[in-house]
Image: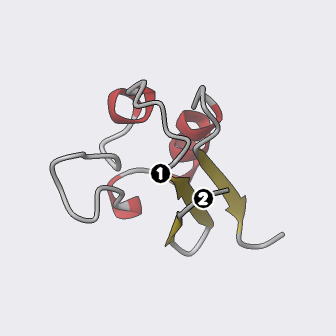
Amino acid sequence: MGKVKEYKNDEITVYWDAEICQHAGKCVAGSAAFNVKARPWIDLSKDSSENLMRVIDSCPSGALKYKKNNE
């Protein structure tokens, strides 16, 4: 992993590795929590953790990952 950023809410922690991101856009298309025009570009309060996990699972490069905080 390269430079990994971490974003948390009460339920999950999201990790984004900018160095391996292919900018396929599946995250931006799948959830309002991902907005490339905003800083930070990931705001977990904009979507449910359930949908975020579904969208992250569709990331083709593996640049986005998550961990459930209760595990």
Q: Which residue is mark 1?
A: 18
Residue 29, by quadrant, is: top left
> Residue at left 15%, top 48%?
37
Q: Which residue is mark 2?
A: 2
First-in-chain label (2 vs 1): 2
Question: Along the line of sight, which residue is nearer the eye, 25 or 49?
Answer: 25
Q: Secondary structure at mark 2?
A: loop
- Image quadrant containing the C terminus: bottom right
Looking at the picture, which amino acid does disc 2 mark?
A: Gly
- Residue 68 image position (x, y, % from top left): 72, 63
Q: In the picture provided, is 48 more to the left or to the right than 70?
A: left
Question: Along the line of sight, which residue is nearer the eye, 23 or 67?
Answer: 23
> Residue at left 52%, top 72%?
8
Residue 56, by quadrant, is: top right
- Residue 63 image position (x, y, % from top left): 58, 44
Q: Are marks 2 and 1 in contact (CB under 8 Å)?
A: yes
Looking at the picture, which amino acid does disc 1 mark?
A: Ala
Q: In the picture provided, is 57 more to the left or to the right than 39?
A: right
> Residue at left 77%, top 73%?
70
> Residue at left 37%, top 38%?
31
Question: Along the line of sight, which residue is nearer the eye, 57 or 2?
Answer: 2
